[in-house]
Amino acid sequence: MSKSDYPVTTAIRFLRAHGIDFEPKLYEYVEHGGTAQSALCLGVDEHHVVKTIVLQNEQKKGMIVLMHGDKQISTRNLARELGMKHIEPADPKQANKWTGFLVGGTSPFGTKTVLPVYVEHTVWDLDTIYINGGKRGFLVAVSPEALKALNPQSVNVATDA
């Protein structure tokens, strides 16, 4: 795929600025299709598609959790692990304000506001992950090592979808 074949988003600019190798992957976006849709289109295991979830704590402070596509986040366990009272999904408008991305196109790379990032610990075990490139219908294939540019903290909060 040549440079002109995929969008240059703030996420792509972040990856380039940090010297992170990536492979762009375009697919047909379907509203509410989620990681199952992208995995199907790209012919990859949904477990390797990592979703970017914007959450907020009881003080309305934002955070990002990176989770396997075929898993859910236990917000109760996350709150417990982080020593917080309550964590819930951020309102889509607030998530957009923090990240600069639309829901369904949220990347952890190149967000408007630097938010704390938490990565499900088993993501590190994968050879390649497919994560949003900053636009609906656009993922990038990267090594999990690329996530280290986000200074993430590992968590153990996955539950079956």
Image: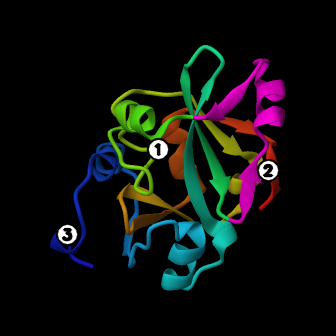
User: What residue did someone put label 3 on?
Assistant: 3
Q: Which residues are drawn in magenta?
A: 70-89
Helix, strand or loop at label 3? It is helix
Residue beneath the point at 43% across and 49% down: 107
Check if residue 152 falls in the magenta segment: no
**Label 3, label 2: how many angstroms apart (C-alpha)?**
35 Å
User: What residue did someone put label 1 on?
Assistant: 108
When the figure is inspected, residue 13 is found, relative to residue 125, above or below; the finding is: above
Q: Amino acid at mark 1?
A: Pro
User: What residue did someone put label 2 on?
Assistant: 158
Quarter of the view holding residue 30: bottom left
Pair 1/3: label in front: 1
Looking at the image, the residue that sits furthest to the left is 4
Q: Amino acid at mark 2?
A: Ala
Q: Earlier in the sequence, mark 3 or mark 2?
A: 3
Helix, strand or loop at label 1? It is loop
